[in-house]
Image: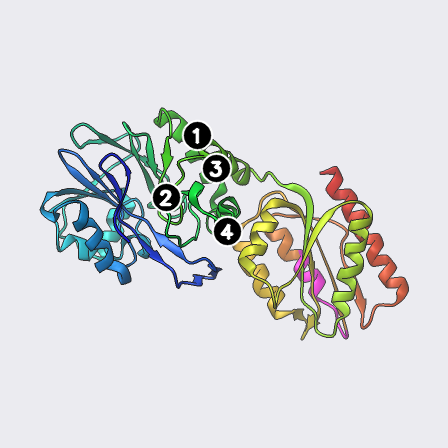
Amino acid sequence: MKAFEISDDVYWVGVVDWDVRDFHGYKTPYGTSYNAYVVRDRKTAIIDTVYYRFSEEYLSRIGDVTPFENVDYVIVNHIEYDHSSALPYLMERVDAEILCTQRAKNVIEKVYSDKWDITVVKTGDELSLGTRTLRFIEAPLVHWPDTMFTYLVEDEILFPNDAFGQHIASSVRYSDELTGIDVFDEAGKYYANIVMVYSPQVRKVLEVLESQIDGIRMIAPSHGMIWRKDIEKIIQLYRDWSGGVAEKKVVIVYDTMWGNTEKMVRNVSAGLEAEGIEYGIYRLKESDWSFIMKEIMLSRGLIVGTPTLNREVYPSVSGFLTYMKGLKPIGKIASAIGSYGWSGEAVRKVEEILKEAGMEVVESNLRFRYTPSEEELEKCEEFGRRFAEKIKES
């Protein structure tokens, strides 16, 4: 795969990682890419680097579009290793000034080198390349404290690093060329698992963007596909996701030891169905947590089913709740159900975790001992009906 021109004298020089299937806990069945870019003018700038394992491929693509001695600037939008660990290999080849935020500078000097020429930039600062201008926009905690966006003013291209990305490996570069994969679905999964915890910061940065740029013709993120169409659609989705906009449907996550919690789940879902509420059921031991998080983000309601094991929440349920709590879903109505044999503490413990995650817990403490009776299963269906009413009212 060669360097790819996305605008006049603006090139994609990234790499495609076809094989990665786990990205710090996030399942990536379609692989990913580490996107980087070159802007050629009277001065030449490189925007971002890649994961160090692909350094030679990255450097080869840069060499295809510009001699290394012509590189004047290296823009570091974000210092997480998948976007910065090839920086030392690049800096061995170029005599260039690095531009980044103060927090990025601190990390670069600690992790890589304190001998490089580094200039700190802030929101609104600009760099002239000759006939073109780069404008910088700080984006702290979207999704690391050091993050910034770079905007190519004359071409109206936004380079937002991890924002607006997706984990997709592909031989095509544009979202509208992609077939067989729903790019918006993958963008939602990416937001839910990478960005959602920083939704308040996302909303702030979206507001800053409106004041700092005149228009966006293209969004060139650092993972996945480049957006040249549907620009307003993906931006509006980020507004919706960061604002907690969700459909009136329910996600049920659970695990089961001897099938008793599963019986409860099935009967609760029957109550939801009877009231016309859409739902999805996911057994945590068998399901992709990354996909579930996307579904939770898009749904108003969450029901968690767990057995009690050794007076604790069942391990797979506990692990998922830890993962979910860290991502801080917004505006959810939630409850917990479960079966037990001896003491039955798990349901109450799950409810506390849901509250700590900022969710509104309703229909509290539905739990039954051993195999639920027909009467108890009817209570599960009644529970589902009442929960459905809460969703309708929300």
Q: Amino acid at mark 1?
A: Glu
**Which of the marked residues, 3 or 4, is nearer the chain's N terminus?**
4
Q: In the rendered image of this protein, does residue 161 appear above or below residue 31? A: above
- Is disc 1 surrounded by few (<14), some (14 to 19) or many (20+) residues within 10 Å? few
> In which quadrant of the rendered image does the C terminus lie?
top right
**Which of the marked residues, 3 or 2, is nearer the chain's N terminus?**
2
Give the extent of the magenta segment: 341-351
Determine the residue positioned at 46% across, 47% down: 195
* Front disc: 2 or 4: 4
- Is disc 3 surrounded by few (<14), some (14 to 19) or many (20+) residues within 10 Å? some
Viewer-nearest residue: 78 or 185: 185
Residue 109 visible in rendering: no
Which label was assigned to residue 221?
2
Which residue corresponds to mark 1?
A: 207
Which residue corresponds to mark 4?
A: 180
In the image, taking residue 280 as reference, residue 2 lies left or right, namely: left
Which residue corresponds to mark 3?
A: 234
Q: In the rendered image of this protein, does residue 353 appear above or below residue 73? A: below
Residue 245 lies in quadrant: top right
Q: Amino acid at mark 4?
A: Gly
Residue 181 visible in rendering: yes
> In which quadrant of the rendered image does the N terminus lie?
bottom left
What distance separates the C-alpha of mark 4 from that of mark 1?
34 Å
